[in-house]
Image: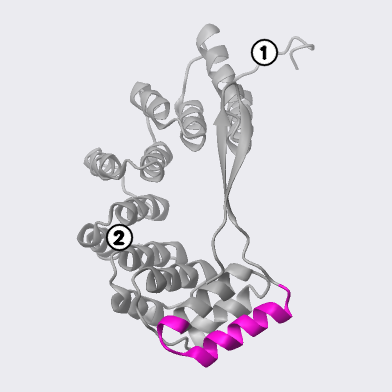
Amino acid sequence: MKLANENPNSVTLVSLLSACTRLLNFRAGESIHCYIVVNFIGIDVALGTALLEMYSKCGHVEKAFQVFNSMSEKNLQSWTIMISGLADHGHGKDAISLFTRMEQTGLVPDSMSFSAILSACSHLGLVHKGRQFFNQMVRTYGIQPTLEHYGCLVDLLGRAGLIEEAYEIIKNMPMEPNSVILRSFLAACRNHGVAITLDDKLRKLLISEPNLGANYVLAASVSSLSGCWNDAADVRVAMKQKGLVKVPGCSWVEVGGGGSTAATINEPLV
């Protein structure tokens, strides 16, 4: 495009920033931002939102917030992405504060906005606030909760050790819980040492993802906690018959000028 002497416009740059976001390529995204500044390209809502999303998803939430504050005009997507970015990077209180500011501007939060704020409450362990936001979403704004919203609520309650309440949410959901919700719940049971019987609903986790070894390990751990040794043994046997193993956790850390190194954390099976 440059060889053809065609100058990129806002739409072109939004597309490029979207590609950088998907690739988590911070260096390229930052170069595009420099191009925008050097060439005095006006930052409209779409371009500003693409910029702050790129910075946020690449882990540079402070730069994202700088872009957000510099935008003369913001839409609901801009606010939601910024709230989500703050929540995802450990700035839960700032995310809640920004959500309140968004409401004060007159913008009506949507389903995605509430997913972001419920996630923030979960990471902060703010059970009362999370319940409050969930009820506000349903009663004030008339938004029908999705699997993602229920997942955030179950995760929030599970992290706080409110296992029975979390299980009531799962049982009373108007739709079938997915594997993410069930795995979150079982992990909470294991982490808090709470014994629970693996009923048919919880066993669906193994059926829905029959080749994921981590699910079998989790189910066996919870069965052992509950004293259901036969169930735990059956799960381990099924795992061995399928030739499954629990994949070790792996974290990627950027070093120096953009090179990457992988740090692997091994965990015992049970």
Whether residue 176 appears in this view of the structure is no
Our reading of the magenta stretch's main secondary structure is helix
First in sequence: mark 1 vs mark 2: 1
How far across and down, in percent of the image, does residue 19 sit? 64, 33
**Vertical side of 1 occupied by 150: above or below:** below
Crowding around mark 1 (Cα neighbors within 10 Å: few <14, some 14 to 19, many 20+) is few
Q: Nearer the viewer, residue 34 or 221?
A: 221
Q: Quadrant of residue 105?
A: top left
Instruction: Specify how the rendered protein is coloured.
Output: one colour
Q: Is residue 270 above or below residue 53?
A: below
Circle 1 SS class: loop
* Magenta segment: 224-243
Find residue 7 and name its label: 1
Specify few, some or many for label 2: CA neighbours under 10 Å numbering under 14, 14-19, or 20 or more. many
**152 and 107: which one is in front?**
152
Quadrant position of the N terminus in the picture: top right
Total numbered labels placed on residues in the image: 2
Of the residues shown, which amino acid type is indicated by label 2? Met
Asked if 24 appears above or below 112 in the picture, the reply is above
